[in-house]
Structures are given as structure tokens and as C-alpha cells.
Image: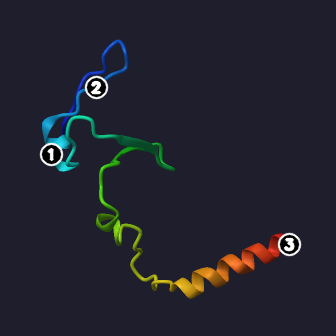
């Protein structure tokens, strides 16, 4: 497990292994998210959209077509009308 220290101003230095894994360079931006279980996750904001393909995949769930998505949005909009 890797660790670091928080300074008086709330800053941390990410260990080199973490920076390499996230492909972070000087000036890279990151986002922190607290999940439902209280775990803090860090996401690099320098990832190309193409690399995000499939990250929301859930085993056993079939992909949804754009037509299905449009239909669901229309149904939801009609519920508000």
C-alpha cells in the first residue's frame, strides 16, 4: 500500500507509482469522488474519451441502442408534460 503526508495547506504529493499508473504529468487535473460506501476515488481528467469505452459495463446487462435511449428519454419527458 502506498501512502503520503498531508501538508498544513492540505496538499499531498502523489507517489510516483500512482502518477505513472494514472498517466499524470505536471499540470494534470484529477477529480475526487466519495462513493456510496465512503471510499474516496481519484480519477484522472486527462483520459481520452475513447479510453472510457466499456467502463460502465455490467455483466449480464445487454447494451442499449441509441434508439432505445431516445425512446426512454421521450417517455420520461412525457411523464413531465
From the viewer's perspective, is residue 53 above or below residue 39?
below
Q: Position of residue 66 (x, y in %)?
A: 53, 83
| Residue 17 percent coordinates (x, y) | 13, 42
Q: Quadrant of residue 6?
A: top left
User: Disc 2 vs disc 3: Cβ atoms closer than 8 Å?
Assistant: no
The residue singled out by tag 1 in the image is 20
Callout 1 secondary element = helix
Q: Which residue is identified by label 2?
A: 12
| Quarter placement of the N terminus | top left
Q: Secondary structure at mark 2?
A: loop
State whether residue 69 is above or below residue 29.
below
Task: Choose top left, top right, bottom left or bottom right for residue 32.
Answer: top left
First reached walking from the N terminus: tag 3 or tag 1: 1
Q: Which residue is mark 3?
A: 81
Q: Nearer the viewer, residue 51 or 58?
A: 51
The structure residue drawn at horizontal position 36% and vertical position 67%, both measured from the top left corner, is 55
Question: Looking at the picture, does residue 10 appear above or below residue 68?
Answer: above
Amino acid at each position: 500500500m502506498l501512502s503520503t503526508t498531508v501538508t498544513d495547506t492540505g496538499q499531498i504529493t502523489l507517489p510516483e507509482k500512482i502518477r505513472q499508473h494514472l498517466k499524470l504529468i505536471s499540470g494534470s487535473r484529477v477529480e475526487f469522488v466519495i462513493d456510496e460506501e465512503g471510499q474516496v476515488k481519484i480519477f484522472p481528467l486527462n483520459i481520452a474519451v475513447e479510453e472510457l469505452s466499456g467502463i460502465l459495463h455490467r455483466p449480464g446487462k445487454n447494451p442499449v441502442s441509441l434508439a432505445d435511449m431516445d425512446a426512454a428519454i421521450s417517455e420520461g419527458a412525457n411523464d413531465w408534460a
